[in-house]
Amino acid sequence: MITTMDKAGRVVIPVEVRKRLGLNAGAELEMAIEGFAIRLVRAVAGPELVRRGERLVARPRAAEGERTAVDVARWVDEERDRWPG
């Protein structure tokens, strides 16, 4: 997927990427330079581990409205399709 940068240095994240990642206007992104690549990571607090009896359970730290819906089954299928065999 290719996008372009305008004169002000802004880059448009295509709508299909924003939808898949649950990015809305105002979403905070962390930018990292890795060699000759720029990596954007959504800046959302990771889950905290809470002990429930003998088990550890991951609880989200992000507010209800900041959480994204995740289709885990689709992601698993996509990852399986990436690898031969």
Image (tube, rainbow, N blue to C red):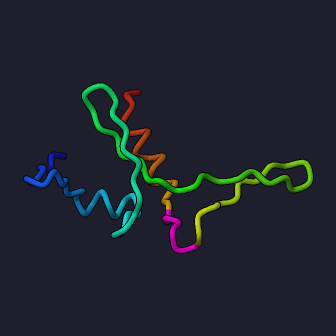
* Residue 50 coordinates in the image, percent (x, y): 79, 54
Q: Is residue 15 above or below residue 79?
A: below
Q: Which residues are magenta?
A: 64-69
Residue under the point 84% across and 49% down: 55
* Residue 56 coordinates in the image, percent (x, y): 80, 49
* Residue 7 coordinates in the image, percent (x, y): 7, 53
* Residue 59 coordinates in the image, percent (x, y): 70, 59
Split into 4 quadrants, where in the image is the C terminus? top left
Residue under the point 30% across and 25% down: 35
Q: Is residue 64 above or below residue 1?
A: below
Q: Is residue 62 above or below residue 54?
A: below
Query: Going by the picture, which residue comes out furthest to the front?
Result: 8
Asked if residue 66 is among those painted magenta in the image, a careful observer would answer yes
Instruction: Say whether residue 56 is left or right of residue 25.
Output: right
Query: Going by the picture, which residue comes out furthest to the bottom?
Result: 65
Number of numbered discs present? Answer: 0
Query: Which sits in the foreground, 31 or 21?
Result: 31
Query: Which sits in the foreground, 82 or 69?
Result: 69
Query: Which sits in the foreground, 16 or 37?
Result: 37
